[in-house]
């Protein structure tokens, strides 16, 4: 998901310097460039659109307050995502996302009345919701790994953890999800081919 | 479920488009923050002498207590007086209590005065 590319790094730096020089309006460029990634990142944490926007807004305000703390060693986006992850984590500690305990999430059956495509979507959504039911130490690596388009290094930098720790937690999270959805692998292949026809 | 399948499900997340007023809402908050007066710095210059005096008092108290405890332990080996009789208030200990009360009252008075000046009280 993180989309603004290398050319935006120079724009980020210029905007940050203008803000630090006393021009708050320059922060708008940062918001415009990064609103999409931050709202989508927040969405993965809570799966509630309205709340995702509130959380992303809070992350921008926190970034604004702490802008002077960004040391240019890492890219602005790396720093921004780390600030945002911290905000989202704390926000979810305060008011957890609505999710069932992992043990209570059942693998959907395949009623004949449902179309293959609908059934497939329903299963995808169940798996994504199951991620929210994982304990936080396993949930966050999964959320950030896929948010960063399966880049372990980027996920690790956002969490401020070593890559090895993130890999280990991802592996454990996958084990938990596999146990919860044992039938998915076989049926999935058939449904995917049916949906594509 | 294979990792590959799991990857495909979790990576194929729908993309949300932020609502149209999102940037404006964030910038309103930023402008509010920018317009707010800076937080009042903690008055270290005023507090520091008090902290130093209190720290010194604590250290002195700890040293005195240790010294008294050691003396009491030494006395208890030679004299077998009941414990309560050594704990009876003497004129000396009453003096210490009076001094402690005076220090507390002074500290309260000074705090009130500084607080009143800064408009906190």
Image (cartoon, coloured by chain):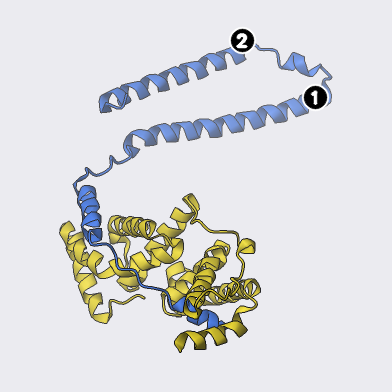
Q: Outermost residue, front direction?
A: A113
Percent across and percent down for residue A136 are 54, 62
Task: Answer with left or right where residue A25 lies relative to residue A166.
Answer: left
Residue B1 in sight in this render: no
State the separation of the CA atoms marked 1 and 2. Answer: 22 Å
Considering the image in quadrants, where does the C terminus of chain B appear? Answer: top left
- Judging from the image, mark 2 belongs to the subunit labelled B
Mark 1 surroundings within 10 Å by alpha-carbon count, few (fewer than 14), some (14 through 19), many (20 or more):
few
| Circle nearer the N terminus (1, 2) | 1
Considering the image in quadrants, where does the N terminus of chain B appear? Answer: bottom right
Residue under numbered circle 1: B76
Task: Answer with left or right where residue A95 lies relative to residue B35.
Answer: right
Residue pictured at 34% horizontal, 75% vertical? A2
Residue B37 placement: quadrant: top left
Pick the residue in front: B70 or B15: B15
Colour chain A is painted in: yellow
Residue under numbered circle 2: B91
Task: Answer with left or right where residue A96 lies relative to residue A21.
Answer: right
Percent across and percent down for residue B89 are 66, 12
Count of numbered circles on the image = 2
Pick the residue in front: B117 or B67: B117
Judged from the image, the secondary structure of the residue bearing numbered disc 2 is: helix
Colour chain B is painted in: blue
Q: Which mark is residue A39?
A: none
């Amino acid at each position: 998901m993180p989309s603004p590319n290398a050319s935006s790094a120079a724009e980020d730096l210029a905007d940050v310097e203008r803000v630090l020089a006393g021009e708050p309006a320059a922060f708008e460029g940062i918001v415009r460039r990064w609103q999409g990634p931050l709202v989508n990142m927040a969405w993965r944490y809570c799966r509630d659109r309205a709340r995702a926007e509130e959380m992303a807004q809070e992350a921008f305000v926190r970034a604004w307050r702490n802008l002077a703390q960004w040391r240019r060693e890492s890219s602005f986006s790396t720093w921004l995502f780390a600030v945002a992850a911290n905000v989202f984590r704390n926000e979810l500690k305060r008011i957890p996302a609505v999710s069932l305990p992992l043990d209570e999430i059942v693998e959907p059956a395949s009623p004949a009345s449902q179309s293959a495509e609908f059934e497939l979507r329903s299963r995808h959504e169940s798996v994504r919701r199951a991620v929210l039911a994982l304990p936080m130490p396993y949930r966050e690596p999964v959320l950030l790994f896929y948010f960063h388009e399966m880049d372990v290094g980027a996920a690790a930098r956002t969490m401020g953890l070593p890559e090895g720790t993130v890999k280990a937690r991802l592996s454990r999270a996958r084990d938990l999800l596999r146990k919860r959805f044992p039938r998915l692998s076989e049926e999935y292949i058939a449904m995917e081919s049916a949906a594509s026809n | 479920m294979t990792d590959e399948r799991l990857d495909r499900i979790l990576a194929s997340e729908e993309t949300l488009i932020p609502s149209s007023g999102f940037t404006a809402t964030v910038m309103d908050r930023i402008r509010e923050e920018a317009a707010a007066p800076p937080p009042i710095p903690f008055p270290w210059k005023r507090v520091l002498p008090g902290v130093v005096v209190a720290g010194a008092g604590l250290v002195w108290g700890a040293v005195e207590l240790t010294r008294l405890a050691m003396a009491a332990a030494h006395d208890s080996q030679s004299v077998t007086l009941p414990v309560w009789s050594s704990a009876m208030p003497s004129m000396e200990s009453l003096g210490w209590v009076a001094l402690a009360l005076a220090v507390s009252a002074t500290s309260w008075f000074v705090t009130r005065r500084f607080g009143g000046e800064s408009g906190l009280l």
